[in-house]
Amino acid sequence: MQVKQIVLITGGARSGKSGYAEERADDAGARLLYVATAEAKDQEMGERIADHKKRRGKRWITVEEPIELAGALLRYRGQLDCVVVDCLTLWLSNLLIRRDEKYAAKQVEDLVEKLPQFDFHIFFVTNEVGWAVVPDNPLARKFRDLSGWTNQRIAKAADEVVLMVAGLPVIVKRGKTCS
């Protein structure tokens, strides 16, 4: 087996992150898992989720996991070539809303600690939320800060970091590669 690779794909909303992650994963292996962290709490989000599923097609196994991300990934050791986690930002939002920032930060640390245990390529999708105006309320500022800190933690552990700009990948960090 090839050396596994951890890739963080970041950028703004609708910058092409998910499609790029799926394309890279599809090129890197045949046994594919998509871990979706979004929850369909309204019709519009339900439609977004349905569009994502339709785009991926039947080749992908999809697991919806809004909270226990590290545990969900560990369950698939030895069974996969590639995983796309879409997205860390929604996962953080779920954690923060259900509990608090300390709980969310602990979950991030748990994920980072478990990264060496994964025996598959993993593509994390996340959003750059700190490039906009400073939020006007404490919860939004906590979310923005937690997102930036999480992106830093995963980027440090990643072999590659890609910034998506208008549908174009810009390589920010490159280490070992998978084909």
Image (cartoon, grey):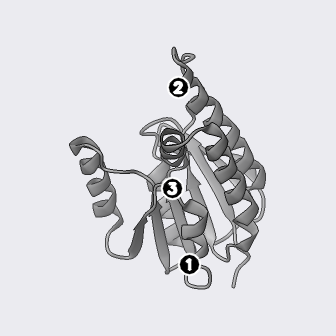
Cα distance in 3D space between marks 2 and 1? 33 Å
Whether residue 164 is visible, yes or no, is: no
Task: Name the residue carrying label 2.
Answer: 140
Residue at 61% x, 64% y: name it.
70
Count residues near mark 1 (Cα–Cα under 10 Å), then give few for <14, some for 14-19, many for 20+.
some
In this view, the residue farthest toward the left is 43
Task: Name the residue carrying label 3.
Answer: 67
Marks 2,1: beta carbons within 8 A:
no
Count residues near mark 3 (Cα–Cα under 10 Å), then give few for <14, some for 14-19, many for 20+.
some
Residue at 48% x, 74% y: name it.
32
Instruction: Look at the numbered disc 2 and give the secondary structure of its residue.
Output: helix
Whether residue 25 is visible, yes or no, is: yes
Q: Position of residue 118 (x, y in %)?
A: 67, 73
Which numbered disc, 3 or 2, marks the residue that appears first in the sequence? 3
Instruction: Look at the numbered disc 1 and give the secondary structure of its residue.
Output: loop
Residue at 49% x, 80% y: name it.
30
Q: Nearer the viewer, residue 166 or 51?
A: 51
Location of residue 81 with respect to 124 vertically, above or below? below
